[in-house]
Image (cartoon, rainbow, N blue to C red):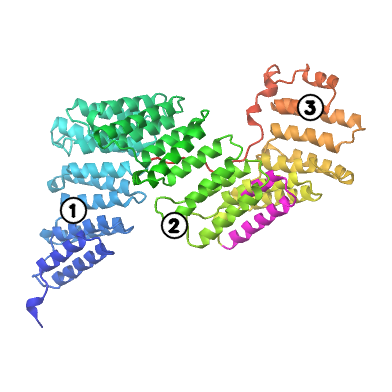
Amino acid sequence: GESHLKPDTITYTAAIHALAKSDERRAAERAEAVLRNMLERYMAGERDVKPDYISFTTVIDAWARSGDSRAPSRAEQILKCMEQLYQLGNKDLQPNINTYSAVINTLAKSGEIGSAARAEQILIEMEQRYEDGEYYLKPNIITYNTVIDALAKSNEPRAAERAEILFRKMLKGYEYGDDKVSSNNGIPPDVITYNTVINAWAKSGSANSAYRAEQIILEMEGRGLKPDVVSYTSVINALARSGEHGAAERAEAILRKMYDKKDAIAFTAVMDAWGNSGDKQGPLRVEFLLKHMEETYKIDGNHLKPDVLTYNAVINVWAKSGKEGSLSRVQHIFAEMERRWKEGEHSLRPNTATYTSVINALVKSNEPDKAEKAELTLRKMLDRYKGKDDDVKPSTVLFTLVIDAWACSGDKRAALRVEKILKDMENLYSAGNNNIQPNVFTYTTVINVWAKSGEKGSASRALQMLAEMERRCAGGELHLKPNTVTFNTVINVLAKSNERSAAARAEQILSSMHKRYEEGNNDVKPDSFTYNSVINAYASAKHQEDKKEALVAALRLFKEMTPEKGIHPDASTYTILLNVCNNLLASDDLESRVTFIKDLFKNCSNAGYVDHLFLKKLRKTVDENMYIHLVGSAEQSTNRLPRYWTRNIAHRGPRQQITRKIRPKSA
């Protein structure tokens, strides 16, 4: 053959380098294949192809760049191969600090669960081996910074604390400069180190995260290092996420300290701090900051130009504030963003977070037509999404939020509107939009709309939706698996329907929940809301011939609410039992009614659930003399009652949390 064209070490090394630097698909895998081919020829005795530690390290770097989920395991496997070959006598394959740092970098970039802990473990091994005499493995500042960064991004337990421990170890070694003190002597932390540790605390969510971030930047300044824009912004982010009292003022003070280093990102982070503060001055402060940015940009044309993230932060502060006129201000800012975007300011193009904040503001408002406006905003967003606009991406949670707005609206059109929204979601999901997948929260919220609608046929529709969820769940769509809240909502629809068989059907669902729970389905454990709804269904019996049986059933269910079952009567239970008395006990059977009410009041007061609603219902159920006899006065307020009677009134019947809260991100 043409032996002069046979690839040699230089050829292989050049190919590996080219693949490592490319962004081609499977480049790392191909680089490793070239290395293995090179290694096979060398092991077969071809000495003109001799891999060295650079070849191996370059392939590890390729895996680090790849974003492939296999990257950490492949990097460690290559390192292990190098260690084995070195022990067999291949002195050119001795892994050094660069090789180990490359593996750590691969772990840091992967973001895989446990990758930061593994990077930390490798660093500890390097320190130990260095102290044992393997001086070529002395960790350097890049090694430490990479592990600290991995911890900062990891969300692992105590990640920020562990990052600071490494940082302190660096400081100790630098300050003492003695081989016997630390393996990293002579490695002073740099600005990147400080910034990364501050960032670790900012992302940690720990109770003292803001304090630690502030202390570290003070240390940084005390050691003669000048904080940069990343340093200051990371501390501001820590303060913004803390929600601590006074955090927003401290964040704004740091912003002033930045002088010419201020940028739009730092201003936006301070606005986020005001948004999370709950301070009534928040909206006014962010408006002041926004005005300052706008005016400075007009004068200097500098980097303080407000962008979509800045405006999102302002909208979010107003949306959270609950101040009078906040919705009007949100809508005004949103309209201004749309106008300026259409006039050519593309940096103000509203994105997903913008629409989310506007919809949140609408949902929280007292506007009579808030549901309709929320849906119109969602559909405006949807039109852009269908037009392949990458800046907007409606989600399941956002659709469910609009459905919940209709649920709270009291509008007669609500049930039909949410059915239309649900159908749109199903169609979008079927068309491949996986981020708009209706789930158990969505379906449960739609059922809740039917519960509140009072529409004829609402119970049938709720049962139909429940049956559909169960059928699809059995077919593998586990995201539609009904839970306790779903079943409670269906029972509530039945209780409000006044249909003759509704109560019996509600109790059948309760029995089914018990059976499933006993079989191991912990998602459907009945609670006090379940029992209250079924008892209420029996209390609503309309036909005289059904009332005796309904009374027996209601009292039987009440007796089932025991600590052994983990179900306790609450304030709502006792108020519903007054309804049982009113509707199911014959009005002319005075003795039975008096006995029932006396026993009920005794149980309720002993349980500590005498609240204002119970008193209001009691006052309508008995005459004034009996009311005074039971309560001790004609007082209908709980303020003057024995504290023992009212000690648990904060626990009035559990209100179901159907939808998840949404916290839009402005940055």
Q: For the residue labelled by badge 1, is the local secondary structure a helix, a strand or a loop?
A: helix
Residue at image location 32% in from the left, 49% down from the top: 115
Q: Quadrant of residue 587?
A: top right
* Residue 419 on the magenta span: no
Q: For the residue labelled by badge 2, is the local secondary structure a helix, a strand or a loop?
A: loop
Distance from the alpha carbon under mark 1 to that under mark 2: 47 Å
What residue type is disc 2 on?
Gly
Q: Quadrant of residue 529?
A: top right
Instruction: Work out whether residue 157 can be spotted.
Output: no
In this rendering, would 190 be left or right of 562? left
In this rendering, would 154 be left or right of 183? right
Q: Nearer the viewer, mark 1 or mark 2?
A: 2
Work out whether 266 lies above or below 32.
above
Q: In the image, which residues are magenta? A: 446-475
- Quarter holding the C terminus is top left
Which label belongs to residue 99? 1
- Quarter holding the N terminus is bottom left
| Residue 173, percent from left and from top | 17, 34
Q: Main secondary structure of the magenta part?
A: helix
Work out whether 568 lies above or below 487.
above
Whether tag 3 and tag 1 are in contact, CB under 8 A, the answer is no
* Residue 470 on the magenta span: yes
- Structural crowding at the residue carrying mark 1, measured as other residues with C-alpha within 10 Å and reported as few (<14), some (14–19) or many (≥20): many
Q: Residue furthest bottom?
A: 1
Q: Earlier in the sequence, mark 2 or mark 3?
A: 2
| Residue 43, percent from left and from top | 15, 70
Distance from the alpha carbon under mark 3 to that under mark 1: 79 Å
What residue type is disc 3 on?
Leu
In this rendering, would 386 be left or right of 198? right
Q: Which residue is mark 2?
A: 387
What residue type is disc 1 on?
Thr
Q: Earlier in the sequence, mark 1 or mark 2?
A: 1
